[in-house]
Image (tube, rainbow, N blue to C red):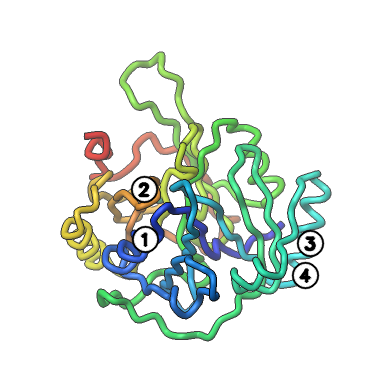
Amino acid sequence: MRIHSLGYIVVNASQPERWAEYGTQVLGMVDASDALNGDAEQCVYLKMDDRPYRIVVEPSATDAYAASGWEVAGPDAFAEAKAHLDRHSVPYTQADAATIARRRVQDLVSFEDPAGNRHELFWGVVSDFLPFASPVGIKSFVTGDQGVGHTVLPAPDFDTCLAFYRDVMGFGLSDLMKVRFTPDPAEPEKRLYFLHCNRRHHSLAIFEMENPTGCVHVMFEVDKVDEVGRALDRMQAAGVPLTGTLGRHANDHMVSFYMASPSGFMVEYGAEGRTVEDWSRYSPFQSTVNSFWGHDFSVGQA
Ligand SMILES: [Fe+2]
């Protein structure tokens, strides 16, 4: 299957209104809930470009990442993707009309990867092209053909998941890491693989560990480093915990910091992410360091 980009993310929250506050005042996105919620709906829709929304927060008893919404290029790509799921004996669920209307797409199926991470596959966004007007003055997020950003999902059954993402979902390998959290050489290394579906260095990464929140982190990219600094200021002013200090990643070159989100998983907020125009001329590498500088994650443990 050929995935175009990460179209949206779905989040579960026991207090969706916390996402409205966080999404607007810290992330700098637009709360589009009033325009998009149906009569009985209590979702929080966050808009970060000319799409109607890029994050949908659904009321739930639990706080967790719920699903990744992957866009394909059109009806033919969608039909081919479903046929590909059939060939690989991956069961999928056809969304009902109400769900399709709520997601504002033409058609949608959902399925799970071998680790139980939920994915939605869709084509054809319904859009009124209302321009993005950030409540905190951000000019633009880096989206378009690069999608929302990237998501890092737990994959304890790593080999099975990696095969699924490459063979079933069609992602390419960007690069990889093997990490230990202690200096003890007896501690088994955990693999972290970065995968692409467009020119963004990675739209998805999978990490060889369980995560009770359903996601390690989600990354949103702004158009300049000053906006990363301004977001750090807003994070501090809002009392949101910092979980990783400012730094520049060795693989995707992103200058970013990490913070908590209202649903438990982390949000990475960055700029200057690397793109690769021709993957056939790119060779994956293994990096032994996370970052050229910064990204101290011990602040998150403190
Ligand atoms: Fe990241």
Mark 2 touches mark 4? (CB < 8 Å): no
Rendered location of residue 213, percent (x, y): 45, 42
Task: Estimate how packed mark 4 is, as few (under 14), some (14 to 19) or many (20 or more) residues with alpha carbons within 10 Å.
Answer: few
Which residue, given by chain and number where applicable, does mark 4 sit on?
Answer: 76
Q: Secondary structure at mark 3?
A: helix
Mark 1 touches mark 3? (CB < 8 Å): no
Q: Residue 89's quadrant in the figure?
A: top right
Q: Secondary structure at mark 1?
A: helix
Task: Estimate how packed mark 1 is, as few (under 14), some (14 to 19) or many (20 or more) residues with alpha carbons within 10 Å.
Answer: many
Mark 3 touches mark 2? (CB < 8 Å): no
Q: Is residue 50 above or below residue 291?
A: below
Q: Is residue 81 above or below residue 250?
A: below
State the CA–CA distance, disc 1 to disc 3.
36 Å
Which residue, given by chain and number where applicable, does mark 3 sit on?
Answer: 80
State the CA–CA distance, disc 1 to disc 4.
35 Å
Q: Amino acid at mark 4?
A: Asp
State the CA–CA distance, disc 3 to disc 4.
6 Å
The residue drawn where x is 37% and y is 74% is 30
Q: Earlier in the sequence, mark 3 or mark 2?
A: 3
- For residue 19, which numbered disc appears in the image? 1
State the CA–CA distance, disc 3 to disc 2.
34 Å
Q: Earlier in the sequence, mark 1 or mark 2?
A: 1
Task: Estimate how packed mark 3 is, as few (under 14), some (14 to 19) or many (20 or more) residues with alpha carbons within 10 Å.
Answer: some
Q: The N terminus appears in which quarter of the rendering?
A: bottom right
Q: Nearer the viewer, mark 3 or mark 2?
A: 2
The residue drawn where x is 29% and y is 76% is 135
